[in-house]
Amino acid sequence: MQTLTAAQFLTNKIQDLKIAVIGDVMLDRYFYGEVKRISPEAPVPVTHVKKVESVLGGSANVAANLAQLGCQVFVGGVTGDDANRVLLEEMLAKLVINYDGLLKSSERATITKMRVIGSKQQMLRLDFEEIGDLSPESIDFLKEWLANLLDQGLDGIVISDYAKGVCSDFFCQKVIKLAHAYNIPVLVDPKGTDWHKYTGADFITPNLKELSEVKGNNISNEDSLIVEQAKDLRQQYTIKNLVVTRSEKGMTLVGDRKPIHAQATAKEVFDVSGAGDTVAAVLLAAVAGGIELQKAVELANLAAGIVVSKVGTYPVRRSELLKEVLTEQRRSGMAFRPLMREEVAALSANWHASGEKIVFTNGCFDLLHVGHVTYLEKAARLGKHLIVGLNTDASVKRLKGETRPLVGEYERARVLAALACVDSVVLFDEDTPAELIKAIKPDILVKGGDYLPEEVVGREDAGEVQIIDFEEGFSTTGIIEKIAKLVKNGKL
């Protein structure tokens, strides 16, 4: 069976996945302002608040990451029955996260971390929380909620433990055993120095500090030491795979086979907040979606690299992760691979969101020659990214006859993608690229020859149409005729 690639997973499979996230749901609130004076009431700075932002935190951030990746997400936990719960519901609903498993409790406050930031410095943090194990009634509610989801069909479960009370020893073990009864993977983002409650988990994802704490000593960030300690913990707690996030040294997975090391990808690290949540979300989704373990670790590591380059808690988006996957393919020499329509649509959405101008053109490009190259270079200069739609072999035959193309579609795609001016190549099988243009929505649609803009197919789905003249004296037909003449005259 052909292995599912990361790009195929992100464009197709991931949207079918149903993932449950169980743990300590939080709300992170940021009050940004400026400081110009000291309070007359006490020797403290007065912060004039200019902006207030709220983001999902704790296990809710894991859920947000999964939702932004395109998964169908169900979140379970306990909050207070208060104004911050209302705000949480609004944010979860906006991301289409199902929160039927989020129990309201009159005995608890919604866990909220409020940060006051003045002149780019954190001035104060206020925590609102009630810590303690759940009541038997709350546990029964969550067990019934999870059992119903499992009966309906789940692909994976994340236990996101922030030591606030939801993830008790009894409850964690109940979740792990239920999941295994349905043969679905469980990933734990752990907390604390006693991992007995995580016994039997398929994945556990401590950072290096958490690994050191559970071992009771400071572990150096070295491959051999981390692998040695991870092997010991796997055996002690019967954990299938232990994944250590190692900051500037990336990630290491220790399981039944040879350890997997993934090097860090971020060029600059601005904020590591929420990176562990991203690793948990992407790794479990990839495994649940059938990605081979080595590739799943690499994908999670790539996602973490995106998150740490941002400021604040930031859920990674499917389109930007796909962009990074395709960039990595280009670096590793796989840039010739033609994209699927779903891939190029997701990539285009990311470029549009970044305000980067997309240029699109199409053609058969059979026997690529200098006229083609000059045309493509001119098209590329009109924007930031040039996408080339390439007729499949079947499409070329319908347009140009049974003897064409002379060069197969994948070979034509590889040669095109090797050009520095071309960002992406995508095959289309129809007689015209109309549906492809509708998916991409280019800022500029380029056509060559003597067309009038109002005659160009797909113009209604593009920002504008530009016509570029072909270079005189260069054509595939001319090359074919020249070869045929040489053969006829016995000179070839």
Image: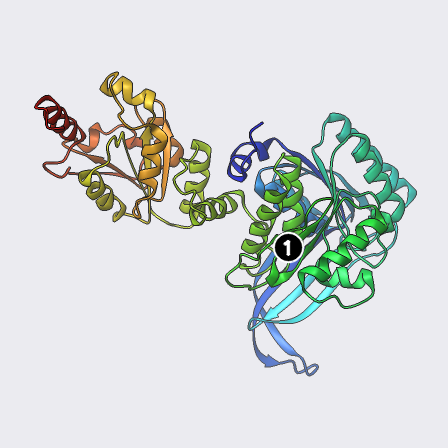
Q: Is residue 45 above or below residue 79?
A: below
Where does the C terminus fall, quadrant-wise?
A: top left
Q: Horizontal and vertical percent for residue 38?
A: 62, 82
> Closest to the observer: 12 or 366?
366
* Residue at the spot 76% in from the left edge and 68% down from the top edge: 218
- Residue that sits furthest to the left in the current view: 489
Where does the N terminus fall, quadrant-wise?
A: top right
Q: Horizontal and vertical percent for residue 176?
A: 82, 39
* Residue at the spot 65% in from the left edge and 39% down from the top edge: 287
Residue pointed to by mark 1: 251
> Closest to the observer: 359 or 404?
404
Residue 102 in which image quadrant = top right
Q: Secondary structure at mark 1?
A: strand
> Closest to the observer: 489 or 341?
489
* Residue at the spot 17% in from the left edge and 31% down from the top edge: 451
Relative side of 233 to 91, left or right: right
Residue 15 in which image quadrant = top right
Relative side of 434 to 346, left or right: left
Relative side of 162 to 431, left or right: right
* Residue at the spot 77% in from the left edge and 63% down from the top edge: 212
Say if residue 91 shows up in the picture: no
Say if residue 482 shows up in the picture: yes
Identify the amino acid type marked 1.
Met
Residue 191 in which image quadrant = bottom right
Q: Horizontal and vertical percent for residue 399?
A: 25, 20
Q: How is the image coloured?
A: rainbow
Q: Horizontal and vertical percent for residue 250?
A: 61, 57
Relative side of 48 to 170, left or right: left
Pointer 1: residues within 10 angstroms few (<14), some, or many (20+)?
A: many
